[in-house]
Amino acid sequence: MSPVKQVNDMLFDKTISVLAVLSLLAAQCFAQEPPQVEKPHGPLLIRSYKPAATSPVNLRNSDHLHSLIRAGHLYLTVQDAIAVAIENNLDLEVDRYGPLSAEWNFERAQGGGPLRGVSNGSALVNQATSGQGVLGSEVAAGLASSNSGGGGTSGGATVTQIGPVTQNLDPVLQNGTSFSHNTGPQPSTVVSQTDSLVNTQHVIDSFVQEGFLSGGYVQVTANESYLKQNAPSDFLNPSVAPVVQIYLRHNLLQGFGTGVNGRFIRVAQKNIQAAQETFRSQLLNVVANILNLYWDLVTDNDDLAVRRRAVDQAQKFYDDTRQQIDLGVVPRFEASQAQSNVTNSRQLLAIAQATAQQQENLLKNAISRNGLEDELLDSAQIVPLDRIEVPDQDNLPSLRDLVAKALANRPDVALARINDETAEISAEGTANGVRPSLQAFAAVKASGLAGTATPPVTISGQSVTAEPYYVGGLGTALGQVFRDNFPSRNAGFLFAGTIHNRVAQGDYGVEQLQLRQGDVVERRNQNQLVVDISNYMVALRQARSRYAQAVDSRRLQEELLEKSQQAFSFGALTIRDLEAAETSLVAAQETEVATRSAFSHARISLDQVLGQTLDVNHVSVDQALKGTGAASPKIP
């Protein structure tokens, strides 16, 4: 190698190093803002009902891309191409939303419950409290219903799914307040002592419910009822009747345990990992595509250089032929053949230029958010700064080592493993769903009653008035509640089972078969992976061998052309012989360019099948998720 060429190569390498450093600094300074969701701020009871803020869509190219354009030329190293593609590629931008959505689905799963708004609580709004007023006395005596028709319950909703339904894990606070003025006829005046009973009532009912991941829930209910009526027999008028109840319900067979009730939360956690692996897979494909586009452009430029040299050689051959004709050495018809060679060479040059321009447009579109709509990018000419290097030896590890590396690195393998784990977690639901339903419930309730004593009433010759213990206001009634003066306790079990249980058994059997089928498919895919790796290893070795042969052939053609030129100068060869030697050299140069390109594609394909494309090209998944391609690369 000549000293001048050595100096040029050193300057070229230093230029690449400086540009690489500058591009990394630019990438860190001009990184794109990735999609993000900002949670609301404020006090708990306020921020829970404020929507989150989502960042707008960014369709502008990164400043990093524009910083690489100088004097109408886009100077790109292969690392630059990867970095700006990571910042601007729309396929990656779409997949950046995947992990975000998975994280919000995980937060949704932590709230538990089958659907939004499904509650297990009951309401006491507009219900007559036992013992309060005329109607309350009739309820206590079993002579009337406690429901006045204005209220209802939020229970009774049934949601079915494969496997037990997880309780709502977010605490629920509910309040119902009603005001009523009711007038009703009294066919018997024995109790009310009036033929038209007029009630003025307000009921304030509140409850807090908390679900347990173990498979149950607890509910604390507080009900305060105020009543004023026109019945002379109501000795406390107006009156208040507070009721406080603690109710607990828990599954003992179906739906019991944190494992089965927390399966959706664990699946959501796995889905976050799956979304990240999906993004990594897309990132790997994008990087591989950029590498192929970049090296194809390098190849097209090399082919363009060969075509330009061919035009120069054809033009020189034509000029020499014209001189030989003028000297009378060769006949004039040789000029036509020489002119035809020039025309053909220029046509091939035009085709090579068009091919290079098309490849340049493909690369521009891959590294841009808005394609060629960016006028600055559209008008710039890409100048690749890296060259394809073909090593003298492959230095490939053994097939067993490469398979182990692929199993450790490939995103699809990781996704298959996550899907298997997710299926195993979901199968806990169908396994638990085979059991019958057995629930235990218990309730503790305390009641109170107080009001204003009415004047004594003479009944059957006796003066009757309210007991002094009940005379008072809301404080008196609450004192009775907290002293538990009027306790109520109840507990019980609820069992439900299905004879034959074929639906649950069928769900469980189908899922278990699918799990086993998935294991077989996974093994089949691993076997195919070994075949693919072996094929790509062979392809890489063949590509390197063909390149070595092409280099030797090109060198031989250069020597033959040199000797042909010497022989032609002594008159031992004709112009046609010299033309044939020059044509053979051009063909050998094109073959060398093509085999070098084939080697680069074989190397990229092998790295891709091994899942090591990101590691080889120093690309960080975390940085790519943030929208920057600067990922701790090794500076050349």
Image (cartoon, rainbow, N blue to C red):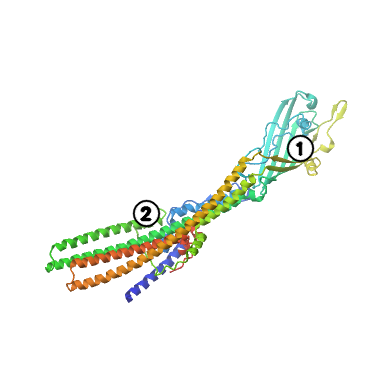
- Residue assigned mark 2: 372
Q: Out of 191 and 524, give the one closest to the viewer.
A: 524
- Residue assigned mark 1: 241
- Position above or below: 537 against 460: below
Q: Out of 568 and 346, give the one closest to the viewer.
A: 568
Q: Residue furthest bottom?
A: 3
* Residue 530 on image: x %, y %: 47, 59
Q: Residues within 10 Å of mark 1 (few under 14, many from 20)?
A: many
Question: Total label count?
Answer: 2
- Please state which amino acid type lies under the numbered disc 2: Leu
Q: Out of 478 and 399, give the one closest to the viewer.
A: 399
**Marks 2 & 1, CB-CB < 8 Å contact:** no
Q: Out of 341 and 17, give the one closest to the viewer.
A: 341
* Residue 296 on image: x %, y %: 36, 60
Give residue 183's quadrant in the image: top right
Numbered label attached to residue 339: none
- Distance between the Cα atoms at labels 2 and 1? 76 Å
- Position above or below: 42 against 336: above
Q: Secondary structure at mark 1?
A: strand
Q: Secondary structure at mark 2?
A: helix
